Image: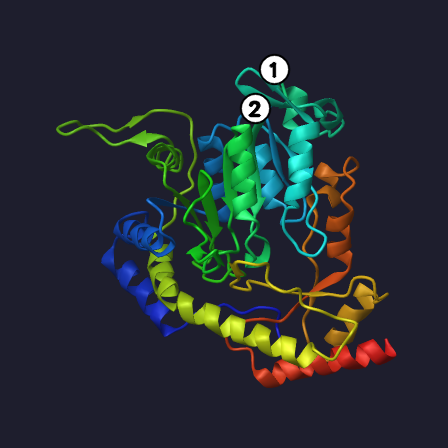
């Protein structure tokens, strides 16, 4: 029997919730979305939560809300799904990529500090990126068509990769020191914790989640923007629905205050999301138990390791990365060896700068190592312990025989 890489936990409760919403006659954004937003905000400890159609939509709106616009740059990582970089370009800005930490998967805060100190300059109230001319070599960069000054550092976009929290304290400190907003790409991180607080209790200006089926909880697709700033929440709510302002009391017509988007979540999706949110604690515990079992089964295998959680972190383990850096293991051969035994695995997290729209400019050695010296192993809520032993057995044979 093939072991899949991932499997969402969906069942009769989700089907019943969707059915009840369909039969209610209200399937578009409505009371279930409002209920989902309220419960999500309460869960993470945020003042506001705004549901949208995808995690990418969440990033776009959050970045716009903190002031990212045409001609700006945003400091982020390449080592992330391409949506992180694409959301920046959707705002008319360009990502400036920071490498990741040598023994992990998140932004290297020392590299971020060096870039802010050495490659940026303060001009009045603005911080400007000195290397902006190099970005004009990227044919699809919005900077190539921007009118007026380009290269203002408009924000930091930090990713909690695979649900592993980045160094929130250090990034928040740098953002405050340099007086720039920052947004958490928490697409994978619902249920994770930093220093005892749930990810989504924003330390930055906003945090953005995804409900894609590969995430910890799913609504089929969807996203959520959480913030403690009422102005950000108000802007995101306006932009997600074509800039519509409801008719005033006694009025006949709504008005449309600005050019905006159709980024709404449906009530059918929100009804499923409410059930999923109720499962979240058990989903996280089951995943953590299975990661612990993986660690035990791989303890005697020197070719492979699962990095320890950073100090102060409690990960939801949205994905399980297996590192084999410095051992000479061939990634492709390893994935094929697992596949020959019916085990699904994937290469490590992609790098946006390795793709054509962003390529040819950046040297990010740690990001590139993680991409080629990591694979993702099967992990989901009902993965059998015997299946973990089966995976470990293949890895043991591979380490000996190749």
Q: Determine whether 367 is above or below 402 in the image.
A: above
Quadrant location of residue 39? bottom left
Tell me the residue at 51%/77% (across/down).
Answer: 382
- Judged from this view, the residue extending furthest toward the bottom is 386
Residue 162, how many percent across, how many down? Answer: 58, 58
Relative depth, front residue between 198 and 60: 198
Residue beneath the point at 49% across and 62% down: 216
User: Residue 347, position in %: x, y?
Assistant: 72, 61
What is the secondary structure assignment of the residue under circle 1?
A: loop
Please report contact status of discs 1 and 2: CB closer than 8 Å, yes or no: yes
Q: Is residue 175 left or right of residue 76?
A: left
Secondary structure under tag 2 reads loop
Of callouts 1 and 2, which one flags the residue occurring earlier in the amino acid sequence? 2
Where residue 129 sits: x, y (%)? 66, 25
* Label disc, if present, on residue 70 of the rendered structure: 2
- 342 in relation to 7, above or below: below
Mark 1 highlights which residue? 147
Residue 357, image quadrant = top right
- The crowding category of the residue bearing disc 2, from other C-alpha atoms within 10 Å (few below 14, some 14 to 19, many at least 20), is many
Q: Residue at x 24, y 58 (%)?
A: 24
At 70% from the left edge and 48% from the top edge, which residue is drawn? 351
Label annotation for residue 240? none
Residue extending farthest to the left is 250
Could you classify mark 1 by the number of other residues whose Cα lies within 10 Å: few (under 14), some (14-19), or many (20 or more)? few
Depth order, front residue of 259/308: 308
Note whether 255 is above or below 356 in the view shown: above
Residue 369 placed where, x, y %? Answer: 77, 54
For the image shown, how many numbered marks are present on the structure?
2
Examine the rendered structure and indicate whether residue 13 appears above or below residue 132.
Answer: below
Which quadrant is the C terminus positioned in? bottom right
């Amino acid at each position: 029997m093939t072991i899949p890489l991932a499997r969402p936990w969906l069942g009769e409760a989700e089907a019943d919730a969707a059915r009840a919403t369909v039969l209610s006659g209200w399937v578009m954004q409505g009371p279930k979305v409002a209920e989902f937003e309220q419960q999500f905000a309460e869960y993470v400890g945020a003042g506001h939560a705004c549901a949208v159609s995808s995690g990418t939509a969440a990033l776009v709106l959050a970045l716009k809300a903190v002031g990212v616009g045409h001609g700006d740059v945003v400091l982020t990582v390449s080592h992330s799904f391409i949506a992180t970089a694409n959301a920046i370009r959707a705002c008319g800005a360009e990502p400036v990529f920071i490498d990741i930490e040598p023994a992990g998967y998140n932004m290297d805060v020392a590299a971020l500090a060096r870039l802010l100190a050495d490659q940026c300059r303060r001009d009045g109230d603005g911080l400007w990126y000195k290397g902006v001319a190099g970005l004009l070599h990227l044919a699809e960069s919005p900077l190539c068509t921007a009118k007026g000054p380009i290269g203002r550092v408009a924000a930091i976009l930090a990713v909690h990769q695979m649900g592993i929290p980045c160094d929130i304290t250090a990034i928040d400190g740098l953002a405050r020191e340099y007086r720039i907003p920052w947004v958490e790409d928490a697409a994978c991180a619902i249920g994770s914790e930093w220093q005892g607080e749930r990810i989504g209790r924003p330390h930055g200006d906003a945090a953005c989640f995804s409900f894609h089926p590969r995430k910890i909880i799913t609504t089929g697709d969807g996203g959520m923007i959480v913030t403690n700033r009422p102005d950000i929440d108000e802007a995101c709510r306006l932009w997600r629905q074509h800039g519509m302002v409801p008719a005033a009391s006694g009025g006949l017509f709504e008005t449309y205050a600005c050019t905006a988007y159709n980024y709404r979540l449906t009530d059918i999706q929100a009804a499923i999301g409410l059930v999923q949110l109720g499962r979240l604690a058990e989903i996280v515990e089951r995943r953590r138990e299975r990661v612990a079992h993986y660690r035990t089964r791989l303890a005697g295998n020197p070719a492979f390791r699962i990095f320890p959680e950073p100090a102060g972190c409690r990960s939801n383990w949205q994905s399980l990365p297996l590192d084999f850096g410095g051992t000479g293991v061939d990634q492709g051969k390893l994935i094929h060896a697992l596949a020959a035994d019916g085990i699904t695995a994937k290469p490590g997290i992609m790098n946006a700068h390795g793709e054509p729209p962003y390529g040819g400019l950046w040297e990010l050695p740690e990001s590139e190592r993680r991409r080629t010296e990591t694979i993702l192993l099967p992990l989901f809520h009902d993965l059998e312990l015997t299946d973990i032993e089966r995976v470990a057995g293949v890895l043991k044979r591979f380490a000996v025989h190749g």
